[in-house]
Every structure is written in C-alpha cells, then in structure tokens.
Image (spheres, rainbow, N blue to C red):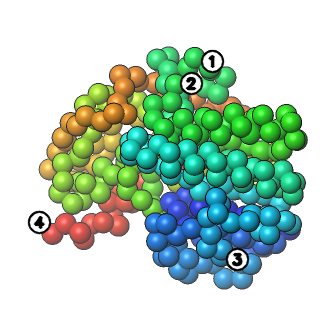
Amino acid sequence: MKKILITGALGHIGSKLIHEIKPNDFGGVILFDNLSTQRYCSLFNLPDNVPFQFIEGDVLQENLEKYFEGVDIVIHLAAITNAAGSFEIQDQVEKVNYEGTKKVAEACQKFGCKLIFLSSTSVYGTQDVLVDEDCSKEELKPQSPYAESKLKSEELLKKMSTETGLKYVVFRFGTIFGTSIGMRFHTAVNKFVWQACMGIPLTVWSTALNQKRPYLDIADATRALRFVIGKNIFDNNIYNVLTTNATVSEIVEIIRSDIPDVSVKLVDERIMNQLSYEVSCEKFKKLGFKFGGDLRKGIKDTIRLLKNCRTT
C-alpha cells in the first residue's frame, strides 16, 4: 500500500482529510505540521488502526530527506492562506509559500515522490465572464501576494517537471467553505457565518457584493484529493476545483434565511478589484470526478455548530 505525507496536515483541509482515512487506505500516513496555529485539536480522535505518524516541524527548517524517503505521495497543504492579510507580510508569504514549496518539490524529486500541490483560483484576474486553465498569461493577474506566491510555485513545478521529471498535479481550489475540526474563519463564507452568529455586521468589500467568485465545499476538496490518488492522476496538469460560483449577495441571503437580522458593512481593502468572473472546472469533471457539495448546506452546517454562541 502507498505511503503518504501531508504537510500542513492539521489545517482546515488537512484535518478533514486525515479524519476520513480508513485503516486499509495507506501503508503509512505522515502528518507534518509546525503547529503555528496551535490546532492540536486536529489530532483528537483520529481513526483507529491507521498507521499515523505525527511530526511537529516546519518544511523550511527541517531536513525533509529523513521523512520523504520511502514516501509515495506528498500532499502539500502547508501555506499562509490569508490573501487579504498577505500584503502586510509579503516577505513571509514568499518564504513560506514559494520557498517552502520549492523545498518540498526538491525532496519529492530526489526520492521519486509524486506531489499534489494546492494552488488557488485567486491566480485569476481576468475580466472574461468565464475562465479556465487554458487562459492566456495576460489573464493571470493575481490580486495579492498570496496569489502571486501560488502562481510562482505553479511555474516552478512546471520547470522542474521538464528539467528533473518531477510528477505532480496542481489543484486551483476555490475558496473553501464547510466544517472541519481544524477550520479557520478568515475567508469569505466562514468569516461571514462567524460574524453573523456573533451579531457582527458582515464586512464585505465595497466592490464585491455582486461579483461572482468560485467556492469549494471542503467535502469536495478532500474527495478530489482522494480521487487523484486513487486514479493515480499525476499528469503535470493544472485543474480548477470548485463546487460553485456565487456572489456575496447570494451567500448573504443564505445566511439571512437562518439569521434574519444579519446586516452588511461595506469596507475598503487593498485586494479589492472591479472584476466579476466565473471559473470553469469542466477539465476536472472530464476525468470522471463528480462534485457533490452544496453551498447552502455548508453554510447551514456551520451555523448549526455555532448556534449556541449567540444568546440574544
């Protein structure tokens, strides 16, 4: 059976993924995380009879060779993911997201590990109504240091595949929504739900209320990861992965169906733009993957977890 290693294993996506692993899925599962966000709870009640090994370490600091040798597949989730906050820490984002990916990819190349790299649909900055993976370079206009670091990492992997034979797949994930034990609340849908449940006005970029953006149910995210592993799809390709395209207005109305008095406060952010576009994921669907997530259900499930926080 295959042995896998997951960087950033205790985060929003990783914590969901590792709790879904069954005893006979893999011959070994190395969980690699630096605990910078102290999500110890992601290790609570892991599935029984799965050969887990937790390593507290930073991919930038550790000698990866002693962990990557003998590993078949690496899922690289470790990253700074706060796009809006990345302007204030550009050097750190570059170091963690790009240099960290470079180090992981080099270790994969050395030991013949196949790599799953998580990029983002934030790399798009097009004014086209619909965008896909075959868009021109002119349409790739990342709007934040976070998105820039992801696009730069994609280009690195492409170069390495040509020069060294690295086998990988890139997923451009939409903004994650839905619950996991290690979830965070700094991105659009989850942040809005948190604010609504706390009785705080939803802080929405003043240009964004009616802009369409891609969103990904966390259940679809982990299923996509397992799908690629199961089908052995490491074809050095980029795939958009998203459950739906939606506007902030649509998200607000779903929240309002459970929390009628929710209000919206328009704010200014450096990341704002006037663009509205939909992202296509037909390329990934053609591999045989079927999305099953639901934005309304994901929002309602998150509200349900927080229902007792607000007593007035």
Residue denoted by label 2: 140
Q: Earlier in the sequence, mark 1 or mark 4?
A: 1
Circle 1: is it few (<14), some (14-19), or many (20+) Cα within 10 Å?
Answer: few
Could you tell me which residue is drawn at 74 percent across and 65 percent down?
63
Q: Residue 23's x, y, as percent?
A: 74, 76
Q: Is residue 300 visible?
A: yes
- Identify which amino acid the numbered label 3 is placed on: Phe
* The C terminus sits in image quarter: bottom left
Q: Quick one: SS at disc 1?
A: loop
Q: Which mark is residue 52?
A: 3
Residue denoted by label 4: 312
Q: Nearer the viewer, mark 3 or mark 2?
A: 2
Could you tell me which residue is drawn at 50 percent across and 45 percent down?
91
Q: Earlier in the sequence, mark 3 or mark 2?
A: 3
Marks 4 and 2, how far apart at CA: 46 Å
Q: Quick one: SS at disc 3?
A: strand
- Identify which amino acid the numbered label 4 is placed on: Thr
Q: Quick one: SS at disc 2?
A: loop
Q: Nearer the viewer, mark 4 or mark 2?
A: 2
Q: Which mark is residue 311?
A: none
In-front residue for pair 109/115: 109
Q: Residue 24's x, y, as percent?
A: 78, 73
